[in-house]
Image (cartoon, grey):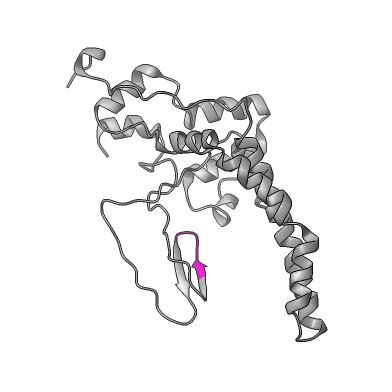
Amino acid sequence: MGMRAMEAARNNPNYFLTYGNGKAAARVQDHLRPNGAHRWHNYMKNPIEIKLDDVAVLHYTYTKFFDLTSRRDRCGCKPAKEDVKRCFMLEFDRAAFIIASTAIEDEMLSWYREHVVWADKTLKRKLMMKGILTRIYAPMIITQGLRESGIYTSVIASANTTLSKDKILSSVESSNTTGESKSVNSSRKIGGFSQSQATARRVLECIDDANYTLAIPPESPPGPDDLNIDT
């Protein structure tokens, strides 16, 4: 790892914050199931995998401060260096779990700012000039465009009128003619389906909030005159 890369890693043994292998995308089809966190499997046939050098599914971890506590609450390990190895493969995840389990909130916030957030403007511009950091505006601009076009508002209105539980149950009952046991399973699925739809509506309503922050106008990349550094 080069000098600039080590500076960007900030004592993290990995070049990226956590994983460097990204995520895999798959064409939706019958019998498709996740194969771990990064690949796919099909029960009926061997999937054809394609690897591209110029395409990546970006996967961001610890995007929110409270991701520290959410990961901590999903694990029953003790906050000790040896015990956390049972739950986490990466040193960064292990350190994050330990700090989330042993520190008060102010200490956690300080750790998060030091290890995850890029607050040093001089260092950011330096690493951008070296091609180690970059700014990605597309997701923010796409989200803002969808919000301004009214897409979110129309989806929320459609969900409130067409995804009622009574209509879904009525549709299932009319098509379910194979016995009581299957009816019970269908009812359970409907409960989970309705709950997931309600969650989706809440997310869209948050995105459609009038107080939503506008996309930040793209900034020009730094040039040699912006910062005096040794080459």
Residue 149 makes an appearance in the image: yes
Percent across and percent down for residue 37 are 49, 59
The residue shown at (62%, 27%) is 210
User: What's drawn in magenta, residue-wise?
Assistant: 33-38
Question: In this view of the protein, which residue sits in the foreground, 147 or 196?
Answer: 147
Residue 107: x percent and y percent? 62, 26
Residue at far bottom of view: 178
Q: Position of residue 218 (x, y in %)?
A: 36, 25
Q: Residue furthest left?
A: 231
- Residues 188 and 163: in front is 163
| Vertical position of residue 30 compared to residue 225: above or below | below
Image position of 95 with respect to 185: above or below: above
Compared across the picture, whether 202 is left or right of 114 comes to right
Would residue 229 appear left or right of 27 to someone viewing this image? left
Location of the C terminus by quadrant is: top left
Closest to the observer, 11 or 135: 135
Give left or right: position of 45 versus 4.
right
Q: Is residue 226 above or below residue 47?
A: above
Which of the two residues, 143 or 226, is positioned nearer the viewer here? 143
Image position, residue 200 (x, y; %)? 65, 49
Q: Left of 159 or right of it: where is 40?
A: left
User: Magenta includes 162?
Assistant: no
Q: Quadrant of residue 230?
A: top left
User: Residue shown at 73%/52% (left/top)?
Assistant: 161
**Residue at x 27% of width, y 40% of height:** 1
- Number of numbered tags placed on the structure image: 0
- Give the vertical position of 204 relative to 33 (above or below): above
Q: Residue at x 62, y 25 (%)?
A: 211
